[in-house]
Image (tube, rainbow, N blue to C red):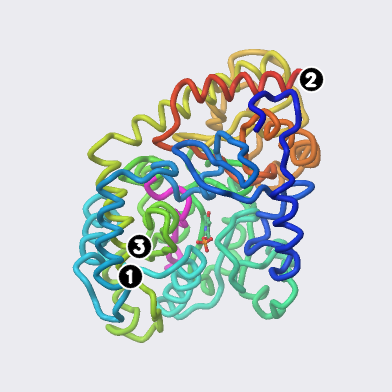
Amino acid sequence: MTASGNERFDRSASARLYSRALGSLVGGVNSPVRADPQPHPAFVDHGDGAHLVDVDGNRYLDYVMGYGPLLLGHDLPETVQEAIAAAVSDGPMYGAPTELEVKLAEFVIDHVDSIEALRFVNSGTEATAAAVRLARGYTDRDKVVVMQGGYHGGHESFLVEGDVNERTPSSAGVPQSFAKETIPVLFNDEQAVRDVFECHGEEIAAVLTEPLLGNRGIVTPVDGYHDTLRELCDDHGALLIFDEVITGFRVGGLGCAQGKYSVTPDLTTFAKIIGGGFPVGAIGGRAEVMQRFTPTSEVFESGTFNGHPVTMAAGLETLKYAKANDVWGHVNDLGEQLRTGLQDLVEDYAPEYTVAGTDSMFKLLFTRERPDEPSGHCTSGCEQRSDCPRFETCPKTGADVAAGATDRWKRVFWPAMADHGVLLTPNQFESQFLSNAHTETNVERTLDAYQEVLTT
Ligand SMILES: *Cc1c(COP(=O)(O)O)cnc(C)c1O
């Protein structure tokens, strides 16, 4: 095992496993982003706190954190482990209700203002698909408005690209008819969404958005954007759905991103953190809307594994631990330290780049334009402050992020960071996360790695 960033890590055991995996798994992986690392992904042996150890024994400081679920890092606290073990030994699942799912639902309802009732499912994709069906059933309308570059999982209604005038499926296998019902608009562009409501207001069942774009770099909302969405939905009888699959219990602490941005959506989707590292999804919202699901009403939703006891135990104890130990205080402080350090580096070495993120999310975006003013910028991640000298050039949409130096990021920058033992998400678009297991020393080491990589 090598510890310094000067020699390349030996990844030969991973190479052999990847070669073998290509013989049995499509593309050698079970989710496409895992194949992004070049020339091949590192296969994991185990996690260790904030670190990940691969099958060659290389140790990386991990900021992927499972793409978001691992708020507490790779080692679960004893209370979480015990709850999981108890649920497993009681029998893995039943197809009948348990107290655990009631407790997790009550926890979410107690802390997130807009939520009066929940339905647990098994992934974020299932949650957003069911939320849209619910909105369509409730409003008796078919069209949904989504954000260009927003991500809501792999479901037909969201695999659509383009704009109000011309749109097409973004994946093979999706019938053209889905593109008729899904209207993508530019995130942060109030006029664009106003125009869509002007043309189609009577047909729109819902606007579905992430509170911040978390899968296209990190793009936070400009002041007032969500209020505009809320108003338009109210004026036209459409539902506002917040996809908090990444931001739920990550941004805004216990109140989630809707609390941080002071917006009350009609429906919210959760996943990732609320499953404590196990497969999960949830739809929550106003009781009057939620009651339209089966069995109380006519919008079909069902699942063998819904409310899985092991997941419910892991999610509940994770959230209870995080609340009792002020985990959000810790991870948000580290996020601030990391983004502040990155902003200093950017001003010195790469003024065209943009530091993005909030709370415990961060990303260095390889934007191309230098600001005229060298100082006075947002100090710990782009806040879309209108008096920031970068405001005109900082990314406001998914397309702005995609217009950056994405190949440089993926093919040059990411491997160099990995060779310094820092594991980032392997492309310009996916967010990175701090966990409760990360320390100030880890952050300092990470900033050193960024500095070395940015200056060589
Ligand atoms: C990850 C993610 C999803 C999809 O969740 P899965 O559990 O991967 O199906 C949906 N929406 C957002 C915002 C996400 O980040």
- x%, y% of residue 228? 48, 50
- Could you tell whether 403 is left or right of 380 in the image? right
Q: Tell me if mark 1 has few (under 14), some (14-19) or many (20+) residues whose alpha carbon lies within 10 angstroms of its own.
A: many
Which residue is the site of mark 1? 307
Mark 2 nearby-residue class (10 Å; few <14, some 14–19, many ≥20): few
SS category of the residue bearing label 3: helix
Amino acid identity at mark 2:
Thr
Q: Position of residue 51 (x, y in %)?
A: 51, 37
Check disc 3 and give the amino acid type. Thr
Task: Say if 80 sits above or below 218 in the image.
Answer: below
Disc 1 residue type? Gly
At x 73% / y 22%, what residue is drawn? 454
Q: Position of residue 355 (x, y in %)?
A: 61, 29
Mark 3 CB lies closer than 8 A to ligand 1: no
The answer to whether mark 3 and mark 1 are in CB contact below 8 A is yes
Residue in the picture at 34% in, 44% down? 259
State the CA–CA distance, disc 3 to disc 1.
7 Å
Side of 113 relative to 142 (left or right): left
Which element type, helix, strand or loop, lies under badge 1? loop
**Which mark sits nearer the N-terminus, 2 or 1?**
1
Residue 54 image point, x, y percent = 60, 44
Q: CA distance from mark 2 to mark 1?
A: 50 Å
Q: Which residue is mark 3?
A: 311
